[in-house]
Amino acid sequence: MTENQPLIMLLLLTLLAGLAMPLGAILANFSRHHLHWRESEIKHGVMAFGGGALLSAIALILVPQGIENQTMLSAACYFLGGSVAFMGVDIALDKFKSTASQLVAMLSDFIPEALALGAAIAIGSPSSFLLALLMTLQNLPEGFSAYNELKRSSSMSSLKLIGLFFVMSLAGPLCAIIGFLWLADQPQAISSIMLFAAGGILYSVFQDIAPQAKLDRHWIPALGATLGFLLGLLGHMSVLTQL
């Protein structure tokens, strides 16, 4: 492997993970116009799938690797700090009557995970591809939900909204480069970011995603959570078999 190959691989992985956000927006726009008779079931199923993918990222990567370089006290502080920070963002959005909570939650997940992915690839971590996969799996339904939320309250055209999502996808490669260049030799910083992100994501799952994923008198959408977590589990098992 040449000296530049890890960096090129990192850029490709984070770009693909980021592009899942506008792809989710495109799918949401399609379902609104062509599958409107099933829009409610699709929306709730996609949200449940995203919640399952987020939980698998927490349980299989962020927490197990995050606690490796932490004491019990520091791990608790970073994990709880992530939840409190995400709660603070929620309160601020509500105070200012913002309708972009899903959008902020999506970026709040994506940015710390991209930082951690950059550092993971720099040190050759075997879980880097799994983390990239889970980032992609969660960005797709989050992009879907964020688009629907913004479309209901914004006067922007569908094309402009999707274009905005494309621009936001570039935050992934940028943060990943920062992690690759400056965090690879700081394992405690990496684990702190992972635990902070895990706490924040867990708060978001139960505050925003899980309540909205339930649909009265419909039971299949909830299976999306199982499928999302299952994909993460299978990816984790494939990594273990290579060790």
Image (cartoon, helix red, strand yellow):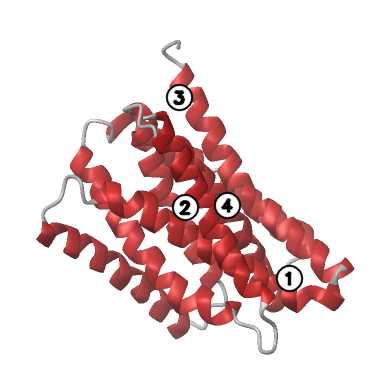
Decide which of tag 1 and tag 3 comes sooner along the chain. Answer: 3
Decide which of tag 2 and tag 3 comes sooner along the chain. Answer: 3
Tell me the SS state at disc 4.
helix
The image shows residue 137 at horizontal and vertical percentages of: 57, 52
Identify the residue shown where x is 43% and y is 50%: 111
Q: Disc 4 designates what residue?
A: 137
Marks 4/3: CA distance?
Answer: 22 Å
Labelled pair 2, 3 in contact (Cβ < 8 Å)? no
Tell me the SS state at disc 1.
helix
Identify the residue shown where x is 47% and y is 60%: 54
Q: Residue furthest front?
A: 241
Q: Residues within 10 Å of mark 3 (few under 14, many from 20)?
A: some
Labelled pair 4, 2 in contact (Cβ < 8 Å)? no
Marks 1/4: CA distance?
Answer: 16 Å
Q: Disc 3 designates what residue?
A: 7
The image shows residue 135 at horizontal and vertical percentages of: 51, 49
Front one among 93 and 57: 57
Marks 1/3: CA distance?
Answer: 37 Å
The reply, left or right, for residue 58 in relation to residue 98 is left
Front one among 194 and 216: 216
Q: Disc 1 designates what residue?
A: 42
Labelled pair 4, 3 in contact (Cβ < 8 Å)? no
| Amino acid carrying mark 2 in the image | Phe
- Residue 110 disc label: 2
